[in-house]
Image: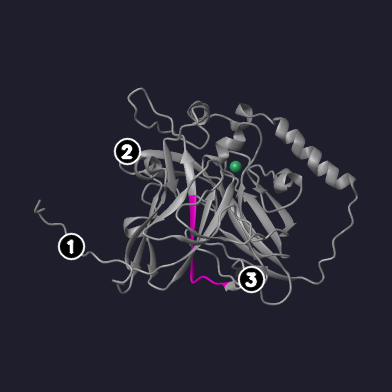
Amino acid sequence: MPHLRSVTPRSPSAKFVSAEAEAQTKAKAKPVDLSGYTRVKQELVDPPFAPKHDQVAKGGPKIVEVELVTEERLITVDEDTGASIWALTYNGSVPGPLIIVHEGDYVELTLRNPENSIMEHNIDFHASTGALGGGGLTHVYPGEEAVLRWKATKPGVFTYHCAPGGAMIPYHVTHGMNGAVMVLPRDGLKDRDGNPLRYDSIAYIGEQDFYLPQDENGDYKTYEAAGDDYADSIDAMRTLVPTHSVFNGSVGALTGDHALRAKVGETVLMIHNQANRDSRPHLIGGHGEYVWEAGSFSDAPQTGLESWFIRGGSAGAALYTFQQPGVYAYVNHNLIEAALLGATAHFVVDGEWDNELMEQVVAPRATSV
Ligand SMILES: [Cu+2]
């Protein structure tokens, strides 16, 4: 097993990190008065689910405590080909868990790196302000933990990701180390006229581009431990051509038995995170009724979209109320990526068919002309 610290010595980023921490100490910043805030713990859950939360904030601003553990684990990306990766994760899942707070709340994160890890990790919250999104204040080596508190001043959905420095940044991000935070307006989501928009459930989808090394026969290589693929991965990443682009960590993670479920009349908020690469979600058979494409809830949502654009390095949200039963495919509408690289999820929707919206007038039959 290689010593990753020697593969990636304390690089320029590490110096940057110490400089950041030093700057904070030297500034002799005034202590913040948090006496008006109540403290709550948010239990994070595995994707595609969302933690328990209120859509409209109850009471005043809060300090929301969350915990992320950096877990390095072998996951199967595609059962059919045996493609696998030593994923770098927050709490074991790809994407990392969804965190939900309200504008004006604080997120107080404990980031823990277990002793049996091989690598150093940190976290950059795009929703936060300062110190490289917190990346400069959260570097944890195996056996260390750090606590970071940041104020959620921007309402929207935002990506977060590991950013240890240099080539390790894309290496960690393309090994699964990213997720999303949703900062709701205190009075909840609204349409362009300020009318409330509410959802019945959240489908949290993390799209992950993987660059898996292959041998001369085109078979996916396997490795003994996290980090052993470093040199091969960097070569594969340099092509900028992913071998996989999957939803929630693996091909089929959200199809078949794992499909998302909904009912006719149910309103689903689809949150799509892509920390590294552009995507263009489309709900086949439905629409983006209200879409915060770039993720900001400060702006009015767009309406009635067919496909929408998720910029690499961001999250976006789309609201839809299902009107027909059946299977809806939620895809990256680069259909090569959807069908060949894995970027497909399914919603299975129960309920009554509406002939007014669609009817098969003539079933396929032999043509008479
Ligand atoms: Cu990391």
Residue topped by disc 2:
81
Residue topped by disc 1:
362
Amino acid bearing label 1:
Val
- Judged from the image, the secondary structure of the residue bearing numbered disc 3 is loop
Classify residue 359 as left or right of residue 207.
left
- Judged from the image, the secondary structure of the residue bearing numbered disc 2 is loop
* Residue 246, percent from left and from top: 43, 46
| Residue found at the far bottom of this picture | 59
Which residues are drawn in magenta?
197-206
Q: Is residue 54 magenta?
A: no
Q: 316 above or below 135? A: below
Q: Nearer the viewer, residue 333 or 231?
A: 333
Disc assigned to residue 194:
3
Q: Main secondary structure of the magenta part?
A: strand
Amino acid bearing label 2:
Thr
Q: 86 above or below 45? A: above
Q: Nearer the viewer, residue 29 or 229?
A: 29
Of pointers 3 and 1, the one earlier in the residue sequence: 3
| Ligand 1 found in image quarter | top right
Amino acid bearing label 3:
Gly
